[in-house]
Image (cartoon, rainbow, N blue to C red):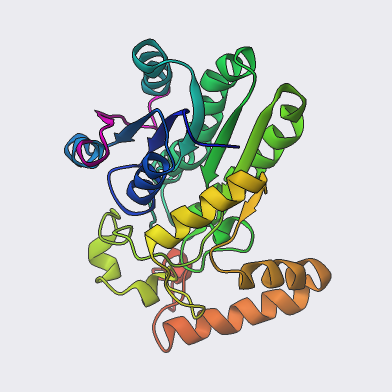
Amino acid sequence: MDIEGRVVVVTGGGSGIGEALARAFAGAGAAHVVVADLDGHAARRVAAGIGGTGVQVDVSDADAIVDLVDGTEAAHGPIGVFASNAGYVTLGGLEDTDERIQHMWDVHVMAHIRAARAVIPQMVANGGGYLLNTASAAGLLTQIGSLAYSVTKHAAVAVAEWVAISHHHQGIRVSVLCPQAVRTNIVANSPDARAMGGDELNTGVASGDGVVEPDQVARLCLEAMAEERFWVLPHPEVAEYVQRKATDVDRWLAGMRRLQAALYGDGPLPGDALVADLPGR
């Protein structure tokens, strides 16, 4: 995939990885970059810096995604790249509410499905296109401290796999971004930011493999797209962890329990809240 001359859409583009992607696509010669974000002011700020278009979009709204695709096509021509990047993190285990889990499902899973449903037909009609879907290393492994994040990011990877298999013959290419810790405002923007206390370590978002910069992640995404590679792993160690999980899942689970204990120390563990009010607790 050559970005030059392509119309690109980036959701969650108002900050962090999305902002870095928008700037990288513009720098690679995209014909036009549409920056979409729940924070319309942030989207317009990023777009102004690259000569693009900034729009306010809630990716949990199915109609809004259709309008984003249709509006981009009408104003700028066929979309060549759709980077479905919006996301957030929460704390919570089995005690988390259905409503909170459903909203994360809409943002992390249905947004990818709805974007693909809206954009693939016109991509096929124009000879092909590229989907770059942001998931997480949690989608290949797990996320300590957040049931909803773990489940939805696994599903996000599955969506990307399915599209990569089912639409490849029609000229559709797919990469899925699966980073560990990236220096963004994902914790500050979380609805659970106060509970997190600004400490990335206690959320499980931080990684012993190091925190990478958004610009580095964006560069790796463009390299993967140029080579049409499916996984984008800013932390290459993740590939080894996936292999360990596949070859000896019981050993991997034991290792994750040790990591959980190290992260939480003497404090309550994820899921303890479900039984905290039971007699004898």
Q: Which corner quadrant of the image does residue 58 belong to?
A: top left
Q: Nearer the viewer, residue 243 or 151?
A: 243
Magenta segment: does it hold 187? no
Measured from the top left, where is residue 77 in percent x and y? 43, 15
Which residue appears at 77% of the width and 25% of the height? 169
Where 197 sits versus 7, above or below?
below
| Left or right side of 79 for 140 | right
Asked if residue 94 can be seen in this view, the reply is: no
| Quadrant placement of the C terminus | bottom left
Q: Which corner quadrant of the image does residue 174 belong to?
A: top right
Where 238 sits versus 257, above or below?
above
Looking at this view, name the residue that lies furthest to the right.
247
**Label total for image:** 0
Q: Which corner quadrant of the image does residue 89 belong to?
A: bottom left
Which residue appears at 48% of the width and 17% of the height? 78
Q: Nearer the viewer, residue 73 or 280?
A: 73
Which residue appears at 16% of the width and 37% of the height? 41
Q: Nearer the viewer, residue 145 or 76?
A: 76
Which residue appears at 44% of the width and 79% of the height? 280
Asked if residue 95 can be seen in this view, the reply is: yes
Q: Nearer the viewer, residue 178 or 264?
A: 178
Measured from the top left, where is residue 116 in percent x and y? 56, 27
What's the magenta region? 48-62
Measured from the top left, where is residue 137 in percent x and y? 57, 61
| Left or right side of 241 for 50 | left
Where 220 sits versus 99, above or below?
below
Measured from the top left, where is residue 23 in percent x and y? 34, 46
| Quadrant placement of the N terminus | top right
